[in-house]
Image: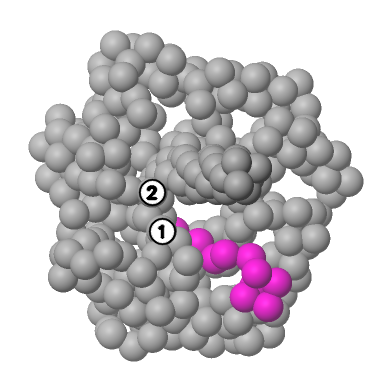
Amino acid sequence: MDSILRKLALLLFLSFMLFGMNTVASAAMVKGIYITQPTFEDTKYLAYLIEHSKKAGINTFVIDLELPSKHYQDNLALVKKNNITYIARVIIFPNGGGKPQEVASEAYWEKKYKLIKTAVEYGAQEVQLDYIRYNTKQGASSQHAKDIYKIIQFYKNRLAKQNIPLQIDVFGIASFGEEKNIGQNIKLFSQSVDAVCPMVYPSHFEPFKVHAKAPYNTVYNSLEAIKDQFDNKKLPFKLYPYIELSNYRYPLSKSKKLDYIYAQIQAAENANADGWYAWSPHNLYDNLFTVLETKNVK
């Protein structure tokens, strides 16, 4: 009898440990940085980013794939070796968004899918689509979002067969409702995406000076507005806002840059986002590393 009880106790303990570990893993917040392909193929600088990212608690790299290359594949081995998640970022419509003829062309979608397919073959754990929108020169129309949604469905159907989650980047303004010029509608898109990445950069919201001085409120209110679109119910997708490391309209001192970054991270965390991605067009992340290592970030 004692032997049976000991076995039951052991099974209960192992079950508890397994459940506990899964809970901790699932609760881990995504913390990522964006990396261009030229930066990624600079092996020395990539090693620097990996080393400091691990120290700072960054667990995800969003990496551009614009042109397949052997060097790209080789450097991915470094990322995987260090247990960093690889998200492939693919630009669908460069040069500021799609022209009507591009948006309507399935041949064009197929061409871009070849790049997505390559990223998956390289080992992408998720795919993130950027510039998946009309260009800003279009007039306002609700048909625009419907057109873009067809493209999202096209890629989602392909990736779902491979069990690869699909992320999409959207303008920060789309957090507050449909943007009819570029054709971005989060509520519509939510039917076919696994994650939404709103670019809630304070520098992009008017009035610019007001938002530059209120990075926390800008990010927090934008994320709360997304929840409002779903009647504050649980979102049907993961939410990974993009934050910016500097306000390009208003120069900031070093200390103010650190505060600016920290405020945005705190806003994302307090809005219960599933994580965040940091955007630096030149992939300079020392200020971010400093914030993560010295301030009270979860």
Residue 80 in the image, given as x and y percentages of width and height: 74, 39
SS at circle 1: strand
Image height of 67 relative to 146, above or below:
above
Q: CA distance from mark 2 to mark 1?
A: 6 Å
Image x and y of residue 131, in percent: 49, 62
**Which residue is more in the foreground, 72 or 182?**
72
* Residue found at the very far front of the displayed protein: 1
Q: Which residue: 83% across, 45% down?
A: 73
Residue 213, horizontal then vertical, whole percent:
15, 30
Q: Which structural element holds mark 2?
A: loop
Q: What colouring method underlies this structural image?
A: one colour
Mark seen at residue 281: none
> Would residue 252 be visible to someone looking at this image?
no
Asked if 103 appears above or below 121 in the picture, the reply is: below
Mark 2 and mark 1 lie on one chain; the one further toward the N terminus is 1
Seen in the picture, residue 153 relative to 291 is either above or below; the reply is below
Q: Is residue 32 left or right of residue 191?
A: right
Q: Are marks 2 and 1 in contact (CB under 8 Å)?
A: yes
| Span shown in magenta | 159-169
User: Outermost residue toward the right?
Assistant: 70
What residue did someone put label 2 on?
Answer: 274
| Amino acid type, mark 2 | Asp
Query: Residue at horizontal 73%, vertical 58%?
Result: 119
Look at the image and say whether residue 121 sits in the magenta stretch: no
Q: Amino acid at mark 1?
A: Lys
Q: Residue at x 29, y 11 (%)?
A: 255
Tag 1 residue: 238
At horizontal 50% and vertical 62% (from top left) the residue drawn is 167
Q: Is residue 27 placed above or below 124 in the rendered structure?
A: above
